[in-house]
Amino acid sequence: MLPSPARDLPPTIRRPRFAKITFRDYTLRHLACGSRNHWHLNQEFLKTISEVDGMAAESLSTLSADEVRQWFHTQVPLEDFRDQKVLLIVPDATRTAPLPLLFGALFDRLRPVVQNLDVLIALGTHPPMSEQQICKLLGIAHEEREKLFFQTRFFNHEWDNPDRLTTLGVLTSQQTAEITDGRLSLDVPVQINSRIDDYDVLLVLGPVFPHEVVGFSGGNKYFFPGIGGPDILNFFHWLGALITNVGIIGVKDTPVRRVVDLSASMIHQKRRAIKFVVAADASLYGLFYGTPESAWSEACAISGKAHIKRFDRPFHTVLSCAPPMYDELWVAGKCMYKMEPVVADGGELIIYAPHMHEVSVTHGKLIEEVGYHVRDYFVKQWDRFKHYPWGILAHSTHVRGTGTFSDGIEKPRVKVTLASGIPEEICHRINLGYRDPATIDIESFANREDEGVLLVRKSGEHLYRLNEA
């Protein structure tokens, strides 16, 4: 029997007033808008954010490498893993994380007592990694791979291979209606990578950051979408898009998080997690062990302090620099998601990524068909777009940001411009602005906050938010 959302899920946060729109396929609710096409959160909703949005990062201290190793020695209980087959689930290279240090300490701790310790990369729909790339990610030298880690197998998640997925159950239309507060009502199959059936314990090792779809990343999100199937992925990404990036990012308890946690409760294997919070220099503010739910919850409290920056007023121009790990717009979109709350109405956000030449290796063709649009562009033309993967529609509207679509006219709140290796013709085709990255002098944007100009030298992981009035 599937868990009852009302019985098994944590108490819900207080929610804002909703306007209700009914469609043939589902019912959605959307946050009430403020004036001048600026999608404001009302004050009741803003109060719910304070649970994890506290002190500045400067008040936190980081752990040394020796302290991290000591933590693994004292805080990871061997009795949870003794004589067990363990599948370690880790992020790919699109997250900042000191994985060589963490993987080495974990391997030293667990390898003597487990039957097997293998690694599955939680790609979601990202491109697969080669063995060489995985070894680099985990800090394994060629000689070590042959002599020390020769028994450890590496796997990529295969989200689009039906033969590699197993069905855990179904979220019923009644459950989805209840858990999403009536925004969506449909049956959703819950599929996951079938390799989990070969193991006794599933151990997640990954960071926690503010996240545009689920509120905060990490926890059971490493199962869904990390190693999950396309149906559940498309469902909750579109749910997040309906709420909007501004409405969900940096909020701990969200409808999307409840979907993810409910889906993970269908997994029969023991689930454990090591969650951590990363500083700008890739050192750690903290490590937390427990169930995916408990370890994630503790890490959220620190991420809310370390990864949220506040400003008194918005900026009319933001230069948001994508780090090299964002090599396609599918992930470099985070440079918009994290900055959207501080861009002024009518302002411009420039994603500066001269190293980026792809919209998406996996989804590029479909994205070029759909383009980048505000949420209501899709909602008010649902019959035209409902057959596209909902995860692609969600990505589109998250990158484009909030705005309106009325009488056939789309009015985004802000202008989103790419200064990258993606050609101008493609930028215009997908409904984004273009600037030649060679014409941008990064330093000319520096130290101009008082003029309404903001430079973010490494964007995508810290959330920028305005102080409440």
Image (cartoon, rainbow, N blue to C red):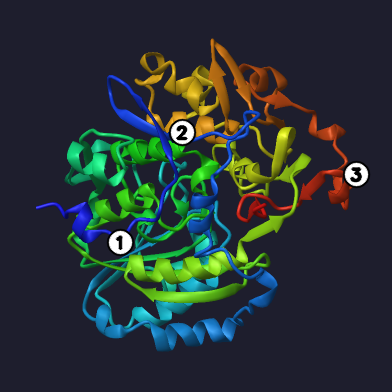
Distance of mark 3 from mark 2, alpha carbons? 33 Å
Q: Position of residue 359 (x, y in %)?
A: 58, 31
Up/down of 347 relative to 1, above or below: above
Q: Nearer the viewer, mark 1 or mark 3?
A: 1
Looking at the image, residue 252 sits to the left or right of residue 220; the answer is right
Disc 3: which residue = 444
Amino acid identity at mark 1 = Pro
| SS category of the residue bearing label 2 | helix
Distance of mark 1 from mark 3, alpha carbons? 48 Å
**Residue at the top extreme of this rendering:** 407
Instruction: Give whichever of discs 3 and 2 has the lower sequence position.
Output: 2
Please give the name of the residue rendered at 41% of the width and 66% of the height, measured from the top-left corner. Answer: 296
Up/down of 124 relative to 115, above or below: above
Disc 2: which residue = 394
Nearest the eye: 344 or 59: 344
Please give the name of the residue rendered at 62% of the width and 28% of the height, measured from the top-left corner. Answer: 37
